[in-house]
Image: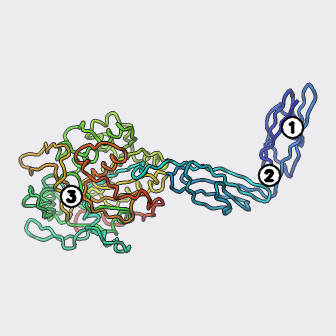
Amino acid sequence: MPLSVVANPQMIAPGQSATLTWTSQNTTSVTIDHGVGTFGPSGNVNVSPAQDTVYTITATGPAGSTTQFVTVAVVSNAVTLNASASPQLITQGQPSTLSWTTAGATSVSIDNGIGSVATSGSTSVAPAVNTTYTITATCDGGSTSTQVTVQVQSQEAGIGAVNHIIFMMQENRSFDTYFGKLNDYRASLGLPQNVDGIPSNAVNYENDGTPVPVYKLQTECIEELTAGWNESHWDFNLHNPTSLTPLMDGYVSTAQGYAQFQGEMDTAGKRAMGYYDSSDLNYYYFMATQFATSDRFFAPAPTQSVPNRLYAFAATSAGYAKVATSTLNTKTIFQSLDDAGITWKIYYSDTLSDGQPATSLSTFFNYYQQHQSQVVPVNPNYFNDVAAGTLPQFVFIEHGSQTGRDEHPGGANIQVGAQYVSTIINALMNSPSWHDSAFFLTYDEPGGTYDHVPALTNVPSPDGIPPQDLNSNDIPGDFTRTGMRVPVIVVSPFTVKNLVSHTPMDYTAVLKFVETRFKLPALTARDASMPDMTEFFDFVNPPWMTPPNPPAQNMNGACYLDHLP
């Protein structure tokens, strides 16, 4: 009656248990000495010998009995080993880190040519293919091993290294208002002062001729302004708004008119000329400087938020210069992605009063109705997806328009909004999604706050549709000029360090980047005309595979609306 017996493990530390396992044939019972007991023909039992012990296992059946012996060695020095790889998934040619800890080990070695290493520690590896590393820890009494697998995905050349594109858009801030003082910050770091920032002698005039020079705001909240169609043209050239000659002289006047119409405090319009600096927006200043920004990045249309946000999805406003009055069947970037089998989601920050997601797709595009499952809350969905490495290939993150996290003038505290954005970006940088992602942060339009750089006046009309909703009191015009400059930050492991782009573009260039990466056709003549933004990236020698450690956003600024500065 054959009897097969094993002990697992053969070597244990005092007080630990081992497993005796046996199989036999033509057996009615199996007995194990040392008081272990009598069992069936096959089975297993845990034992805890106090010292090296030889167990006698006897199998009995109709034909007689057979005995085997198994020794469990009890050693005074046992070794334990824990090991992991971070991240588990890397792009070909990029590094991963193997980490391990041991107890009781006198030596540790790793195969695949790594060799002897410290008894606890870490080492960087860059496998060319999926590789399983065997880590072995040895002590005087024996050894133990564990295996760690690093998965390697192939890397396409150039822009093909980006597998996740995240686009987030906040509200109503001009470049000068936010980043006009970037040169001062860059100078403090010993970097070139090559940003076209706010001139120290910039000035606009109240309607009675009183000068209002630029000045540092002391409040993180200001009253509402507007970059509506008429106001944007007046900001460009107050007394000749149809002209293509930029004077950039109407900001204070339009802010005056808006305050008087809305019953606001600042009827002198001085809030339009205020700016912030790195003491207010320390997180943004750090990110824009360590990564990349542009001082020629414009809103697509010279008007308010809604038409501009339509451009962010469709590269056109479908003829609307004001708030769209009907839902659109215009093709969006999301339909293009679906047509090509590219995954996408919109993560929304807030819900509207009717319980619907606060996103332009649900409010203005019929395409939403068949794709509601791809429109989900930021919390917890974005944070779960980014931590799990399951972000879709394209992501749009909506602003917190209902909860004061969108930085919108009219009461929103810019530091609250910047802190919210920091949680979104930091989660990406500290996730397995980081190594093949690109994050674009910008603002939907400048909001009527001052900027000294003229809008672009020679961009193509997206689809040949002129404004359909202007009346006889509105300034005539077409969609062949952009809105004013808006801030932008490009965050990625591939972002060129400290870059300031001077290439003119509006933010349909982000759509062009998406289209270039995923080989999609242009939506309109506007995104087709844009640069693809690859100048912001180094795909050969990625500068930021290990991201920097940004500061926590300052939250100590005053927030008031009843006076200036």
The amino acid on which the numbered mark 1 sits, given as a three-letter code, is Gly
Whole-angstrom CA distance, mark 1 to mark 2, is 20 Å
Q: Which mark is residue 15?
A: 2
From the image, tell me which residue sits under label 1.
37
Q: How many marks?
A: 3
From the image, tell me which residue sits under label 3.
484
**Label whose residue precedes the other's in the sequence (3 or 1):** 1
Quick check: marks 3 and 2 in contact, CB under 8 Å? no
Q: Is residue 446 left or right of residue 440?
A: left
The amino acid on which the numbered mark 2 sits, given as a three-letter code, is Gly
Secondary element under disc 2, as helix, strand or loop, is loop
Q: Looking at the image, which is closer to me, 66 or 500?
A: 500
The N terminus, quarter of image: top right
Q: x, y (%) of residue 303?
A: 18, 52
- Disc 1 residue crowd, few under 14, some 14–19, many 20+, Cα 10 Å: few
Secondary element under disc 1, as helix, strand or loop, is strand
Secondary element under disc 3, as helix, strand or loop, is loop
Whole-angstrom CA distance, mark 3 to mark 1, is 86 Å
Quick check: marks 3 and 1 in contact, CB under 8 Å? no
Whether residue 402 is visible to the viewer of this picture, yes or no, is: no
Q: Looking at the image, which is closer to me, 304 or 137?
A: 137
Q: x, y (%) of residue 413?
A: 31, 60
* Rendered image quadrant of residue 368: top left
* Rendered image quadrant of residue 496: bottom left
Q: Nearer the viewer, mark 3 or mark 1?
A: 3
Residue at the top extreme? 62
Q: x, y (%) of residue 251?
A: 16, 62
**Label whose residue precedes the other's in the sequence (3 or 2):** 2
